Amino acid sequence: MTDGDRYESPLGSRYASPAMQALWSGRHRAGLWRRLWLALAEVERDLGVPIPEAALADLRAHLDDADLAAARDHERRLRHDVMAHIHHLGDQAPAARAYIHLGATSCYVTDNADLIVLRDACRLLLGRLREVLRALRAFAAANADLPTLAYTHYQPAQLTTVGKRATLWAFDFALDAEALLRVVQSLPFRGCKGTTGTQASFLELLGDDDAKVHELERRVAGMFGFSESVAVSGQTYTRKLDAQILDAWAGLGQSAAKFANDLRLLQHDGEILEPAESAQVGSSAMPYKRNPMRAERMGSLSRYLIALRENTAYTAATQWLERTLDDSANRRLVLPDGALAADALLLLAGDLARGLEVRPATVRRNVERMMPYMATERWLMLGVTAGGDRQTLHEVIRQHSWAAPDAEDRGEAGGLLERLAADPALAALDAATLRRELDPARYVGRAPDQVREYLAEHLDPLLSRLAPFAVDDAAGVTV
C-alpha cells in the first residue's frame, strides 16, 4: 500500500535509509555525470586540448543545479538519457556546450558513475556492519559465561553459552565485512576507454600520444578516488564486477537470515526476545502476542536480496561482444534494489543486536530441565571408574534416556537421574553422586574463553579497520 496514486518501492518508502536512497537518486547521478564531464574536460585541457577556461568555469558553476524535468523533456525527444543531459547541461552552460563529453561514449558517465555509487554504497554498508558488530560484541561479552542449551538438528545438545552463540552471528557478519572491504579496496574505475574500449577517440584527440592517453585515464580516475581503471574493457566495464558486488551483498542476506532465524527460534523458547516498543501491537485479534516481527522482516528481505544476485550473474553471462543493451533495464532495477535491501537488513540487524533481551531465568530453567541428559557422558565415565563395563553402562543409560521423557509425559514420578540411581547396573553411584555432576558451568567447555579470545584477537582488530566507515544517519527509518 502506498500513500499516493502511483506505486513506489517499499524499499524506499519503508525500509532503506535516506543516506542510501540519496546515493541512488537521480539528482545525485546527474551531479556525478556533471563532475565526470568536468574532470574529463579539465584533464584534456591540461594535456593540450584547446578548451577555453570559460567553458570549464561554466561547467563548475552548474554541478548541482540540474533541472531533472528539463532533462526528461530532452529525453522524450532524443530517446537517449545521456544525450538528454548533455543538451540540458549545454543549455545551462553555453560556453561549455561544444566541449561537453569530448571523446567520450555514454558509458564514460554511466559506468563510471555506477562504480562510484556502488563503491560508496559498499562504504555505507560497512558503516552499518560496524554498528551490527559492535552491538554483537557487547552482547557476546555480557553473556560470555551464561550457560545455555546448544542445539544440533534443533535437538538439545551439549551446552554452550549465550555469548558464544552470539560470536557465531558476529563471525558471519565479520566475513561479510571482509568481503565488502575487498570490494571497496579493489573496485576499479571504468576509465576513459571510448566507444569499444580501444581509446581510439582519445588517442586522436591527444595527437596519437600514448603517454597522454594513459595520463588522462590515470588522472581522471584519481579525481574520483580510484587507484586504477579496469585493465581492458569493451564499451562497458565487465558486468562480472556487478555480480561480484551482489555476491558480497547476498552474503549479508545469508548472515542476516541466519541471525533472524535463530532469534525467532529463541524467542519461541522465551530465552531471548527481540526489542519491542511499549505500544507495539503483535496481533489485531490476540492482544497478548509479542511477535518477532523485526526478525521476520529481516528474513523476508534477506530472501529478496539473495535472489537478486542471480540477475547479475545472468547479466554477466549474457553480454554480447563489446556491448549489448539488454543489461540496462535489469541493472537499473537490481543494483539500487540490492543496495537498499542490504541497507535495510543491516539497519534491522543493528536494531536487533542493540536491543536483545535475555531472560536468564528461562535460560536456566531450560538448562536444568536437560542437565541430566547433558551429564550422561560424565555419569558413564563415573560408572566405568567404579568398575562397570563401558558398553553395558552405555546401553543402560541410553534406554533410561529414551524412556524417561515418555514416563514424564505419562505423569510418572522420577526423572532420568532417579531412574539411573535406582538401576542395579549403577549401584556404585547414588543419587547424590550423580547430582554433583549437574553444574552447568562444567559443561560449556572453553566457550567463555573462546568468546573473549575471538573478541580480542579477531573482532576488535576488524572493528578498528571499520572505524573510518562510521555512520549515524538512520533518522526517519522505521525498523
Image (cartoon, grey):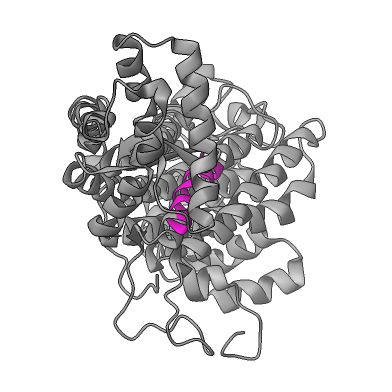
- From what the image shows, is residue 185 above or below residue 296? above
| Residue 452 inside the magenta-drawn segment | no
- Of the pair 256 and 358, the residue shown nearer to us: 358
Q: Is residue 223 left or right of residue 438?
A: right
- From what the image shows, is residue 145 above or below residue 336? above
Q: Quadrant of residue 315?
A: top right
Q: Give coordinates of residue 234: x percent, y percent.
A: 70, 31
- Of the pair 220 and 21, the residue shown nearer to us: 21
| Residue 261 inside the magenta-drawn segment | yes
- From what the image shows, is residue 219 above or below residue 77? above
Q: Give coordinates of residue 205: x percent, y percent.
A: 58, 33
In this picture, which residue range is highlighted in magenta? 248-265
Residue shown at the point (50%, 84%) measured from the top left? 283
Residue shown at the point (54%, 90%) measured from the top left? 285
Can you say which quadrant of the picture contains the N terminus? bottom right
Q: Give coordinates of residue 104: x percent, y percent.
A: 61, 42
Q: Quadrant of residue 204?
A: top right
Q: Is residue 180 left or right of residue 162?
A: right
